Amino acid sequence: MSNPADHLDIGALQDLKEIMENEFETLVNTFISDSQNKVDELDAVLQQQDCDALRKVAHSLKGSSSNVCAFRLSELARQLEMMGKEETLEGADQVLSALRVEFRAVSDILSTNL
Amino acid sequence: MDNQVKAVETEGEAIETLRILIADDNDSDRLILQTIVRKEGHIVYTAKDGQEAIDIFKEQSPDIVLLDALMPNVDGFEAARTIKQLAGDNLVPIIFLTSLRDATSLADCLAAGGLDFLSKPYNRIILQAKIKAFASMRRLHETVQAQRDEISLHHDRLVHEQEVAKQVFDNIAHPGCIDAPNIKYLLSPMAVFNGDLVLASRKPSGGMFVFLGDFTGHGLPAAIGAMPVSEIFYGMAQKGFSLQDILREINKKLKRILPVGVFCCASMVDVSFRKHSAEVWVGGIPDVLVYRKQSRQLENLKSRHLPLGVVDSDRFNTDTTLIQLEKGDRVMLWSDGIIEACNPQQEMFGEERVMEVLRNTEDADAMFDNLVAAVERHTGRGEQDDDYTMVEVTMVGEEEMGNALGADGKSYMAGGPKDWSMTYELRPLTLKEFNPLPLITHLLMEVPGLRPHSGKIYTILSELYSNALEHGVLNLHSDLKASADGFARYYAERTQKLNELYEGCVRFHIDHHPVKDGGVLTIVVEDTGPGFDFKSKEENRHKTEGYSGRGIPLINTMCRSVRYLGKGNQVEVIFDWHVDV
């Protein structure tokens, strides 16, 4: 497993954990299942070349991943959002692959940190 | 110690519990936000999209709304617009939750009614600060709203009170016979609150009083004085009091009740249609104008007196100017409102313009209307807004005026007792201590139309009474009064005899009988004294002159007849009176 600090803002995550208390587990589970759906959705819309849908789904993932302190995941989502917005899907597949890898890593770290 | 202070501080800053709606389609984001807000002690409602947010808003009307911009179904922008509409006058702060960064998107949030943004990732401190700021903004808005409502309530109440007051004023300070055919007037419906007052009353004798008053100040304080003025004016005018009596009474009353600096500028006219004349009194108000129809000349009657309510009764001057008026001649009274009426450039209409309009009018009948039109042209306002008051009284023939006090066909002779007699016997205990003259005079003045003769009647009564008491009951001799020394002795004796009085009495027999336009008043005064040999005196053609001490010659000039009866202890006076005084 790679260094958690490469994927998540550990300090901020600690704060979040404190705020959420018992709810933290629910949050992580919600985030993971929610984001899994979004990643799958990104796959689908990219195949359909639906730029507007890509922008919206990526925007949503950008926001939620930033809230769980996953800055790298958020950044990758932002790149997809921009592509959707600018309607230039060149290289989007590569970004999505990287995002998928990043999501796996973030999920693993969050799950083990419960 | 520290703890205590802290506790107090915490209490002072105690965060109020707000009801906050959070709308976000992203489950994990919503969960985080909801947890943070709940931890701050607020009540949270959550919605997954814009439509749900609108539904919950309708149901719960939360204090603050946190709204994600991009949501499925109804998005944040549309939800914000609907919520704003639903909130109406109330301020419901909407804070957009967004990770949008571009200016256009942020501007869209504001345009939709958002007051602020909260960007992801959420920061607890910033969120807390924003909720606090908007909660206090909301309270401020509520306070302003409550005060606005209160002001509007007060305003409504004030208007209502003014309406009620106006009704009362209109009933009391009604303009009397102002609709008589010889009067034209201009009086704003709210004039009483401008301090203006117009009163007109027919006199029992057939003449007419017209009064125009202008109180200092505006609003209720200016209106208050109108009530006593009106009551005195109508009460006294109908009882036949003179212009002088009425003005004196009004002045006395106003001087007593009004605060210093509040007074009533006024003019009053007493018109006699029979004599074709008018008496005019002007106190502190613009010149009364007299327009001569024949010569088309204007005469100014300047104010010669202080306004009403300024000086004490003993310094109050009721001197009037007597003018003769031909048919068609006019007397015009006004408040300074006309002269001070300003155009949009704040330029007053002025006395010059008034005179100019009047001089340039060919047809006297059009004079009044021309003046009104000229003022309205000057001010550029309609009649509704004016606060100037003006009255024009035209001299007409008596026959044109119809019955005095008689729009309802009632004669001035109606109302009081006019066909009656009475006997009033005063015995020693009463004679010692009581002067019956004011009471009897008062009784007589209830006879409709008799009031203007009160002076003469009082003189007659008082002469007869003192004769009966002093020469009759007390048996004093008027010869005593021939010298200064005797005068004093006379009164000393009178006092002594009165104190010792234990028998005897004075009797009044009074009879009033009405005739057309007047009446016959018979007064017989009888005493229990020895009387005197009046017959021999009469035969000697001395008639009444022989009793110089008894004041009879004076009485004789005032009435139809004076006769002694019985053994000289009765005297009968017959007094004829007519409304034409």
Image (cartoon, coloured by chain):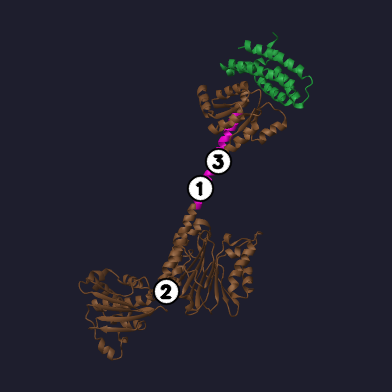
Of the numbered discs 1 and 2, the one sitting upstream in the chain is: 1
- What residue is drawn where x is 47% and y is 56%? B165
Identify the amino acid type marked 3.
Gln
Identify the amino acid type marked 2.
Pro
Q: Who is closer to the viewer here, B109 or A16?
A: B109
- In the image, is B355 to the left or to the right of B159? right
Residue B102 percent coordinates (x, y): 72, 29
Question: Local crowd at mark 2 within 10 Å, few (<14), some, or many (≥20)?
Answer: many
Tell me whether the residue at label 3 lies in contact with that at label 1, contact meaning CB atoms closer than 8 angstroms: no
Identify the amino acid type marked 1.
His
Give the letter of the brown chain: B
Residue B475 percent coordinates (x, y): 24, 78
Of all chains, the one bearing label 3 is: B
Question: Local crowd at mark 1 within 10 Å, few (<14), some, or many (≥20)?
Answer: few
- In the image, is B416 to the left or to the right of B327? left
Of all chains, the one bearing label 2 is: B
Q: Which residue position holds label 3? A: B145
Residue B489 percent coordinates (x, y): 28, 76
Q: CA distance from mark 1 to mark 2?
A: 46 Å
- In the image, is B79 to the left or to the right of B250? right
Q: Which residue position holds label 1? A: B154
B132 part of magenta stretch: yes
Quadrant in the picture for the C terminus of chain B: bottom left
SS class, disc 3: helix
Give the letter of the green chain: A
Q: Which residue position holds label 2? A: B204
- Residue extent of the magenta highlight: B130-159
Q: CA distance from mark 2 to mark 3?
A: 60 Å
Residue B348 visible? The answer is: no
- Which residue in the rendered view is the most extreme toward the bottom? B540
Residues beneath discs 3 and 1 located on the same chain: yes
Q: CA distance from mark 3 to mark 1?
A: 14 Å
